[in-house]
Image (cartoon, grey):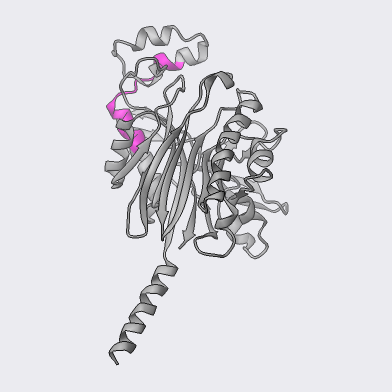
Amino acid sequence: MYKLICSLLIAFFSLNLSASTLEIMSYNVENLFDTYHDEHHNDFEYLPFGHPAKEEGCRNIENSYYRGKCFRNNWDMMQFNTKLRTIVDVVRREGRELPDVLALVEVESRKVMEALADELGYEHFYITDGQDERGINVGVLVNVSAQLSVISYEEIQLNSSRLKKPTRNVLEVTLKIGGEVLKIYINHWPSQNNPTSDRIYAAEMVRKKVIKNSENGYHSMVVGDLNVKSSESPNPIENILVNGASKMIDVESEFREDPTISEQLKRSIPPSSYYYKRGNDWTHLDRILVSPSLLNGVGTDVELESFDIFAHSDYSTPTRARDDRGVNYDTHKPLRFNYHGNGRSEGASDHFPVSVKLSL
């Protein structure tokens, strides 16, 4: 009887272990700056009135539109805390559990990451210290558990001599998940103001890492704002990461093209995480790419139906969209953060967060 009970307990816990999941979210939080000036960074728009560096810094901005924005924006602690609150609200997703891994794009500093970690309850966070002229970086918050631990992290330097102008570095975080190794790459590639060759260079740097991971038996995941449009040719995602030697798989594409996933579920989320007003264009800037080992049905695997683009009802605006079958449906588009003073604001970010779960 004792052996039977032990066997049943082992089977029970093994079943629970195999059924456990981890969620990874990626979110471009749009200009989440602290209120301090960092030397050699053009962060003057995101300083409070009266800061000794603000007036001269704003005056030296050549573009009249951005110069005016800089002078008008009183980025004090009240406005910072209001912005922080909106991001926290979105990540909490109206009562859902927090993602186990939260990758962030457009965060300025360690101070910002500390504030987010405190508000959300994450114990571990990492952030780059890149060469971006404005001082924005990428970072990640991790909730360590019995099934998730951090092995190491590394900042992948992008050589500025290869680029039109200095850009954000890539953050590599090595995780142990359910006994397997997953390397996540958090990206914010050069914007569309840069030539496609700049994004190709960033893609090539990541591809080298992904290929090496595959040779070592590690899983890879590439997340963040890749700033790539489908019209680019050669395409930094399709030609370098998906169809290249790294053979990465775009999770959103797989989700939308899978015939076993209902159209109702697909239409329950926005068409994309980013919306261009010009041309009514939903553009897939924020991506989750995974190595084939995470979609082969063996061991740790992506739960494809869990893919999500979250539109918080308080920080988005209703609109209409058309799916791939030409069917119109109601959805939401992102609402940018707009501060009205005295802690009042609307919107959170011009991007929606994207997420997916891994079954262990």
Assign the magenta stretch its main secondary structure. Answer: helix
Residue located at (37% from left, 21% from top) = 46
Is residue 239 shown left or right of residue 10? Answer: right
Image quarter for residue 11? bottom left
Residue closest to the far bottom: 1
Q: Which residues are magenta?
A: 69-84
The answer to which of 204 and 59 lies nearer the viewer is: 204
Left or right of 327 in this view: 107? left
Residue found at x 37% / y 55%: 148
Quarter of the image with the N terminus is bottom left
Q: Residue furthest front?
A: 216
In the image, is residue 275 above or below residue 181? above
Picture coordinates of residue 77 (x, y %)? 28, 27
Q: Residue 33, percent across and down?
A: 37, 27
Residue drawn at (63%, 31%) of the image: 200
Asked whether residue 163 is in view, the answer is no
Q: Is residue 240 magenta?
A: no
Q: Residue at x 50, y 52 (%)?
A: 218
Q: Is residue 27 above or below residue 269?
A: above
Decide if residue 334 is on the left or right side of residue 120: right
Vertical side of 99 occupied by 109: above or below: above
